[in-house]
Amino acid sequence: MATAAATLRHAQQPAAVRAWRWFRANVLFLYTGFAVLYLMLPVLVITLFSFNDPAGRSNFVWQGFTLDYWLDPLGVAGLGDAVVLSLEIAFLSTLVATILGTLIALALVRYGFRGRGATNMLIALPMATPEIVLGASLLTMFVAIGRPPFFPLSFFTILIAHIMFNISYVVVTVRARLAGFPRHLEEAAMDLGANEWTTFWKVTFPLIFPGIMAAALLAFSLSIDDFVITNFTSGKTQTFPMYIYAKSRIGIPVQVNVIGTLIFVIAVGSVLISTLAQRRDRAA
Amino acid sequence: MAEREQGVLGTPVTRRRMLQGSTLAGIAAFLAACGTSATSPSAEPTAAPTPASSAPPASTAPSPTQEPTPAQTPSAELNWANWTYYIDVDENDPNKHPTLDRFKEKHGTTVKYQEVVDDNDSFFGTIKDALRGGQDTGWDIVTLTDWMAIRLVRLGWLERFDKANMPNFTANLKDRFRSRSWDPGNDYAAPWQSGMTGLGYDEAVTGPLTSVKALFADDPRWRGKVEYLTEMRDTIGLTMISLGLDPAKPDRAGCDAAIGVLKAAQDAGIVRDVKGNSYAEDLKSGDAVLAMAWSGDMMQAVIEKEGLRFAIPDEGGIIWTDNCLIPKGAAHKFTAELAIDFYYDPENAADVELYVYYLSPVKGADEVMLQKVPEIKDDPIAFPPSEVQARLVDFGALSEDDEKYFNDQFASVLGVG
Amino acid sequence: MGAFLRRNRRLVPYLLLAPGLLWLLVFYVYPGFQMLITSFWSGSLEKGFTFSLDNWTNYTAALSRFQGYYVRSIGYSAAATILTFLIAYPLAYAIAFKGGRAKNLLLFLVVAPFFTSFLLRTISWKIILGDSGIVFGPLKDLGFLSEDFRVLATPVAVVSGLTYDFLPFMTLPIYVALEKVDKRLVEAAQDLYAGPWRRGGTIAGIVLGGGLGLLLGQIFGYWPPFLAVGGALAGAIIGALFISESFVRVTFPLSLPGVFAGSLLTFIPSMGDYINAEFLGNPDTRMIGNVIQNRFLTQTDYPTAAALSFILMAGMLAAVAVYARALGTEELTTGRV
């Protein structure tokens, strides 16, 4: 009876109040929608302009729709090489940095050892150092050790730099995940007779794997996106961001937008696929 | 079962941790000190270049007596760093350069041509550490302006040309370049193009402009939409001209006066930005309507946007020359020499000229151009009339200390001083 | 292997740490000291550099000449951090508490823009915010804005660019912290402190909103009182109507470690940024990163550049140490339950 009366009262309230109530209840959803839109806006612009047909070299005024550049995405000299290089470096640096970083995170969370504070500082420092300082100091070092050409500025110097800055981010991300880890599962496994090695691979690792993947994802995107440090340590070798910077002076070819959009779509696609696959595994 | 969450950085910074940290730092300092001896500065500007390290078979280490080394073959690749809009371009495919393709047919070399030079200083920044360390910069030819070439010669960071490989260059270099004080034998720098710095503007917005003082005038038509160049000599040069000073004799007093005018214009809100090549983008997009501009850039910008114009001011403009240089330790020196020489053939030089519309240093190129495109003789940018040429001034050479002073003062115009 | 490990249990952490730490030692610490040595050089590229401890004056000279840039960078970075926080927190909250099945998707959407180059994104903002571009062109044509109005080449554009760039860095740590909050605590709090935080919210909103408005007005060069009033009004509305007391008393404090982490990950890289200032700003908005870049690459004035870099790094470290101490993240997370 009380509820019926309440419902009646509710329905009798003016539309404005009802609208306000609806708004208050859904404000977070609306906000999320706008936030996501804001985040995606530049990506949308990049995608939109990949279909543009500019008359000259500059691609910032919409002049007409065309699929030409999509059909010939690597048609610009140097672009293909730059993209391949970026992907190679991102993949390798992610691999190495994730391994090194996860090991450190494991040590920090699970073990007591001396030099803990110093270790924490050493890991936090690269994140606290502006990229420009990281890049410039690396460059001076590479050249200093360089006789005989031990570290020519090239693929390897970029790779070394990327691994270096990625380690810290991996450690922080994996640590956040590890901290809430249910140790009792491991203890249970060991009670049941598994040795430490088996426990790690069969119990611990699968559980922290999502955290490691999150860290790897972060490292990959940091690497593929890096400009400042790469600029200082690459000499002449061009990664994709450096290619863009060079071209931004005179006019970015439409193909760059195409590649940018492609990278985005592939990344989204692969995450979607892996999520669906996980869901199917769990259901099965 | 709350695990002891360590927070982001772990344990708080206590004195003990600081000490531990500094021990770590001390070890690193020791390592650094060991390495320092390897890095202690050794700028050995040598007059006679020492042989380059790790010379692959295709290139040659310059010998002091300049004997032509026998039986060299062009390499498969050549790496060339150049400015934008500085070479001929295929009409149908902006990535193809007909003259480079012809070079490939002739010698079999694929030229990796990259338009990565946006301004002399930032490009120098990418190669100087390799040069200081005696390493290959990765470039075989770099095209840089006179004053940067002077600096590189002074530092001994350029390969000396083997003239036996460069007959065209020896024969066809225009006379005005043959006795430059800093490269009297033309052994280190081969002029690529000369250009003019003047006014680039959108006539539809500003109306026709003829005075350099427009750049500093608070006119509502262009207030907040004016751009200056990051090239110190162009910007200070034009400013000195507006003050009635002579850029060919730059001194600190002139520098101070020019900087004063520039800062005043910036403070008055007249200036939008100070840029390298990208001023052309802003003129095209309308974000800027008046800029200090380079003649060749403007030729191409004019095609892309109606209403853009280029003019050398009545008071005068700046003329400058970019040079092809071979950095020390270049992997393909021989092929680089062949390439430079290739462009001293009037035919090839004319082909480039017909695209870039700068001023060619090659004898005979003008005649070939006129044969191919007779209408060009009336184009004021490609063939500036003599009264315009008379107004063009070369910015004078600066001593190392003066250069530092000028750059330091100019940093305040750039916003970083 | 297992036997070896069991016997030398104490070695295990060191073995785990060794490879990564070694990498950081060689490729971070050593170059860092190279940089320190460089800052005590005097001379020039052509004449050669010499090391001398007397050159500590490089530091004083650098500070006296360039201190304005540090101040400006701090201002821009602080503004960007606060703005990023304001945008990211509700987003993280929404995902953590209302995300449900869509959580991972939403998180991915937050991170997704990273899969395009940050240069391309900055240039996109240059297109979007262009004087006669997609946003302002129509507004100007319709007469809502004067022809002179522009966002590009002003501090607003630079701070907006910074804010946008670091949004994921702020959202993710806050999300992680919020997600770990025990939902039962929140329910209990909601039982205890039912309803919106009316009075406290309004006051806090006015103060914080007004303060932010003042700060932004100062940094952007707009008339501060105008922004302050606007900020106070917005703050009051949000505080009074949208914030619940349970949130303020329970959820927010528990999420502070995430806020702290996110703020650091935003403020610090933002201090060293120079791309946003270069593409979206003008000579009056250059940050300390631009100065350092100019000193290194254009002027080849290594000693000053290295000194500036070191001051920047030292400042960052000090700020981080103080912040960590003050916020006392340990206490907050050892669980009040």
Image (tube, coloured by chain):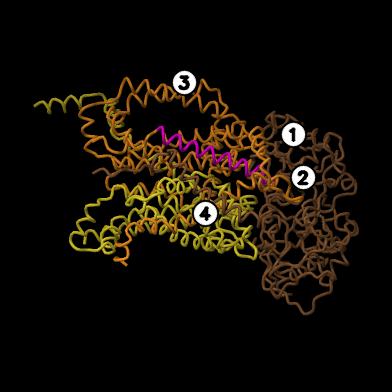
Which residue matches tag 2?
Answer: B310
Q: In percent of the image, x 37 and y 34: which residue is there?
A: C328
**Which residue type carries mark 1?**
Leu
**Both labels 4 and 3 in a single chain:** no
Q: Which residues are magenta?
A: C301-326
Q: In terms of sequence position, does the residue under pointer 1 or pointer 2 come before the other? A: 1
Chain letter belonging to callout 4: A
Q: CA distance from mark 3 to mark 1?
A: 37 Å
Chain letter belonging to callout 1: B
Which residue matches tag 1?
Answer: B262
- For label 3, the SS is helix
Indicate the position of residue A126 as horizontal and vertical percent values: 49, 48
Q: Nearer the viewer, mark 1 or mark 2?
A: 1
Chain shown orange: that is C
**Both labels 2 and 4 in a single chain:** no
In the image, residue C261 above or below residue A169: above
Indicate the position of residue C148 as horizontal and vertical percent values: 62, 31
Residue A277: which quarter of the image? bottom left
In the image, residue A8 above or below residue A47: above
Which residue matches tag 4?
Answer: A51
Chain letter belonging to callout 2: B
Q: Which mark is residue C229?
A: 3
- For label 2, the SS is strand
